[in-house]
Image (cartoon, rainbow, N blue to C red):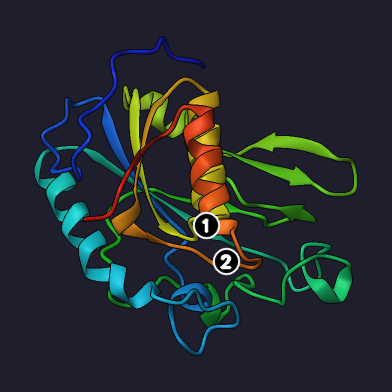
């Protein structure tokens, strides 16, 4: 389902005074990304745990839906470098690395992604590597069932899964915000952060500068 565009949301950090059609998407706040001992630790990730928890608390108190995405990879997948992909093994199904960070409040549906031979960056879709086909996850259906027309995307990492989720959200017709104070970036290559922010803006994402 796609959604008709509406006027832009406010340009300040979300305080969850939005209408009931707004949801918070919490992306991949998992051990392997958010803990210093994780296999793909994102620098600065621990700093956003409490701010994201506050956003979750505010959203729930206002009656908004909170949805979580979770990398959920098989042990053998072309997503991993040892099998031809880009990344070291991470967030393997049922492993400690795939668990949510213990400090994160989890109170809402969880969407798993990348559980086949897939690149699973966006919460809305995965790329099935053997066929090159994009396949939808359950996320859009969950949002539509709850009357959601706008989303705020937070979590890890800003230049990969947050970016892909936000751009996909716009593609599907959701008004989309990304507050930079509530994400951190991998910066695999110099300039990736700025390039990701520009790509989101060009796609129609409202990027909210960090305070």
Q: Tell me residue 88's x, y (percent).
A: 72, 77
Viewer-closest of 7 and 61: 7
73 versus 172 height, above or below: below
Answer few, some or many: residues within 10 Å of disc 1's Cα (few below 14, many 20 plus, some between 14 and 19).
some
Viewer-closest of 24 and 43: 43
Q: Tell me residue 37's x, y (percent).
A: 50, 90
168 versus 190 height, above or below: above
Q: Tell me residue 133's x, y (percent).
A: 81, 36
Q: Tell me residue 79's x, y (percent).
A: 77, 62
Q: Please tell me whether mark 1 sits on a helix, a strand or a loop.
A: helix
> Residue shown at 29%/37% (left/top)?
23
Farthest residue in the top direction?
A: 4
Would residue 95 appear left or right of 139 to someone viewing this image? right
Q: Which residue does the numbered mark 2 point to in the structure image?
A: 187
Viewer-closest of 24 and 6: 6
Q: Is residue 59 visible?
A: yes
Would residue 97 appear left or right of 9 to someone viewing this image? right
The answer to whether the residues at label 1 and label 2 have Cβ atoms under 8 Å apart is yes
Q: Is residue 138 visible?
A: no
Examine the image and state in which quarter residue 17 appears: top left
Q: Please tell me whether mark 2 sits on a helix, a strand or a loop.
A: loop
> Residue shown at 48%/46% (left/top)?
197
Would residue 62 appear left or right of 183 to someone viewing this image? left
Q: Which residue does the numbered mark 1 point to in the structure image?
A: 193
Tally of numbered tags = 2
**In which quadrant of the rendered image does the C terminus lie?**
bottom left
Alpha carbon distance from label 1 to label 2: 6 Å
> Residue shown at 51%/59% (left/top)?
70
């Amino acid at each position: 389902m796609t959604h008709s565009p509406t006027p832009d949301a406010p340009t300040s950090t979300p305080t969850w005074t939005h209408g009931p059609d707004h949801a918070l998407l919490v992306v991949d706040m998992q051990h392997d990304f958010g803990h210093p001992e994780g296999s793909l630790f994102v620098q600065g990730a621990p700093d956003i745990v409490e701010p994201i928890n506050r956003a979750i608390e505010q959203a729930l108190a206002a009656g908004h839906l909170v949805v979580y995405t979770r990398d959920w990879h098989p042990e053998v997948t072309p997503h991993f470098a040892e099998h031809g992909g880009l990344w070291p093994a991470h967030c393997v199904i049922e492993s400690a690395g795939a668990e949510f960070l213990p400090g994160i409040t989890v109170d809402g549906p969880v969407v798993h992604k990348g559980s086949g031979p897939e690149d699973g960056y966006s919460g809305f879709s995965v790329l099935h590597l053997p066929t090159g086909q994009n396949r939808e996850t359950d996320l859009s259906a969950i949002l539509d069932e709850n009357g959601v027309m706008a989303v705020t995307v937070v979590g890890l990492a800003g230049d990969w899964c947050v970016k892909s989720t936000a751009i996909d959200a716009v593609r599907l017709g959701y008004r989309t915000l990304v507050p930079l104070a509530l994400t951190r970036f991998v910066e695999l290559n110099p300039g990736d952060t700025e390039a990701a922010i520009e790509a989101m803006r060009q796609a129609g994402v409202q990027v909210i500068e960090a305070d």
